[in-house]
Image: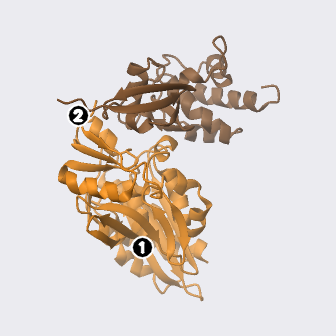
Chain colours: A orange, B brown
């Protein structure tokens, strides 16, 4: 349970880090919070020859509110997402969901950028980024590019990032008026990976009918899984009762591909998606009103 | 193989240490093997059991998921540093003793290091909140019941004017 030897680089600037990654190529790995990478190294599942520690680069954990949304530096700790009042105000969905990620000891180290780049299908933050329509800024020595969260996740533990690219910033666009959000998940114990969970984003028009709906599920496929057909069933309707949302919550099951695990069969995961979906859609709609 | 050593300076329980470490040395192993502070226990070594919890700049973290080299310039707190004196115990330790909140004791340092900062920010937790606070620490002996009782007793003791 000890990692194999590696070279350790601790850059003081972003440019140094990008340069080191360019030089290291596919043998190099960025180290963010280390709450997924270090266990993988302890098990020797991951054996990077070069580790580039991002923890001493000033400004990479900056939180800012701008006209175009909430800017979160990639090294923003989950603890900050949980407690920073600016996050709660601009993106209450994040503040609601982040306390459900693992345990305080993990959230004190784990970062938003690290979790997104790791792309675990059971993780909360990828689902939240997709549900909130986040834009992700990636840097390399070649320059920078923006990637929509909906295009960032390309499969199990796989993202659109090239090996030498670094996710540096996450931008959550401002909430539209009359928009409510809700995150719900079911886990066997507090802090365990959830067996199923979803983020619901519901926008209402001035008459109270649903204008926009987004449903994104965790542990329902090989990445964050959106259910656009079920969401479309909500649009144009009043969704203020459990009966009004039941059909869409039920239909979403068809768009999910849960693989099951030791603790939950795919059928049970679908059942959870149905029940949690009904509750989350209704709660989000109530919060939007 | 050429030596791949990094100089680090770490303050552990108020004592400054200067060491040369391999990058792959985990903070948990550094504390135990280099500094002889064996109060920090190593259970699962992949961040699940919480036995190795220490304070890094005052915040509880898994010391098996941090490299010692990352603690350069930082303050680390371990279970050896929590008692007020050599013949005294911290009120939380006393409460664990009084309420039989340990049997084999292997997990206890991790529980203590998790709970100390928790009680500072939550001086009057409910039983449900205590269970949530310790959800990241595994104990295979007690069934947690006595641990919860000890935390509630310690919270009362620590928040009383004489405590």
Please indicate whether residue B6 sits to the left or right of residue B152 in the image.
Answer: left
Q: Quadrant of the N terminus of chain A?
A: top left
- Would residue A267 be seen by someone viewing this image from the given angle? no
**Residue A133 rendering spot, x and y as whole percentages:** 42, 73
Task: Count the marks.
Answer: 2
Q: Which mark is residue A204?
A: none
The residue depicted at 36 percent of the width and 56 percent of the height is A269
Q: Residue at x 38, y 68 (%)?
A: A136
The chain ID associated with circle 1 is: A
Mark 1 surroundings within 10 Å by alpha-carbon count, few (fewer than 14), some (14 through 19), many (20 or more): some
Q: Are marks 2 and 1 on the same chain?
A: yes
Residue at figure coordinates x 61%, y 21% from the top left: B96
Classify residue A1 as left or right of residue A285.
Answer: left
Relative to A190, B91 lies left or right: right
**In the depicted view, which residue is nearer to us: A279 or A79?**
A79
Q: Which residue is mark 1?
A: A133
Which residue is found at the position 36% from the left and 76% from the top? A228
Assign the C terminus of chain A to one quadrant of the image.
Answer: bottom right
Mark 2 / mark 1, whichever is N-terminal: 2
Label 2 with label 1: CB-CB less than 8 Å = no
Q: Is residue A183 visible?
A: yes
Q: Secondary structure at mark 2?
A: loop
Q: Position of residue A14 (x, y in %)?
A: 37, 58
Depicted A212 relative to depicted A77: above or below: below
Splitting the image into 4 quarters, where does residue B34 fall? top left
The CA span between labels 2 and 1 is 39 Å
Which residue corresponds to mark 2? A4
């Amino acid at each position: 349970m000890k990692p194999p030897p590696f070279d350790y680089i601790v850059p003081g600037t972003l440019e140094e880090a990008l340069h080191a990654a360019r030089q290291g190529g596919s043998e190099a790995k960025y180290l963010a919070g280390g709450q997924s990478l270090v266990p993988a190294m302890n098990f020797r599942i991951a054996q990077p020859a070069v580790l580039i520690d991002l923890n001493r680069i000033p400004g990479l954990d900056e939180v800012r509110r701008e006209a175009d949304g909430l800017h979160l530096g990639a090294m923003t700790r989950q603890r900050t997402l949980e407690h920073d009042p600016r996050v709660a105000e601009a993106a209450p969905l994040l503040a609601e969901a982040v306390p459900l990620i693992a345990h305080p000891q993990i959230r004190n180290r784990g970062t938003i950028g690290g979790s997104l780049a790791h792309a675990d299908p059971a993780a909360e933050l990828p689902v939240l980024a997709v549900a909130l329509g986040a834009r992700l800024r990636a840097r390399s020595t070649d320059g920078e590019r923006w990637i929509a969260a909906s295009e960032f996740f390309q499969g199990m533990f796989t993202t659109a990032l090239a090996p030498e690219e670094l996710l540096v910033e996450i931008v959550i666009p401002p909430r539209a008026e009359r928009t409510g959000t809700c995150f719900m998940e079911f886990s066997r114990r507090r802090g365990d990976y959830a067996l199923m969970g979803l983020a619901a984003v519901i926008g209402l028009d001035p008459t109270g009918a649903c204008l926009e709906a987004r449903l994104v599920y965790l542990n329902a496929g090989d990445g964050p899984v959106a259910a656009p057909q079920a969401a479309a069933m909500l649009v144009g309707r009043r969704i203020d009762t459990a009966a009004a949302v039941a059909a869409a919550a039920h239909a979403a099951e068809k768009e999910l591909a849960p693989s099951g695990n030791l603790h939950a069969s795919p059928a049970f995961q679908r059942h959870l998606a149905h029940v949690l979906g009904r509750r989350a859609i209704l709660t989000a709609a109530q919060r939007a009103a | 193989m050429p030596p791949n050593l990094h100089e680090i300076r770490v303050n552990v329980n108020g004592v400054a240490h200067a060491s040369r470490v391999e990058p792959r040395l985990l903070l948990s192993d550094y504390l135990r093997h280099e500094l002889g502070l064996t109060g920090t226990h190593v259970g699962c070594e992949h961040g699940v059991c919480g036995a190795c919890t220490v304070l890094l700049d005052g915040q509880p973290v898994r010391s098996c998921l941090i490299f010692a080299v990352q603690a350069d310039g930082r303050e680390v707190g371990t279970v050896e540093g929590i008692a007020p004196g050599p013949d005294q115990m911290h009120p939380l330790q006393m409460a664990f003793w009084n309420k039989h909140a340990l049997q084999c004791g292997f997990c206890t340092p991790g529980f203590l290091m998790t709970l100390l900062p928790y009680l500072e920010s939550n001086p009057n937790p409910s039983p449900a909140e205590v269970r949530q606070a310790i959800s990241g620490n595994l104990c295979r002996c007690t069934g947690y019941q006595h641990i919860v009782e000890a935390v509630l007793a310690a919270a009362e003791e620590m928040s009383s004017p004489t405590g």
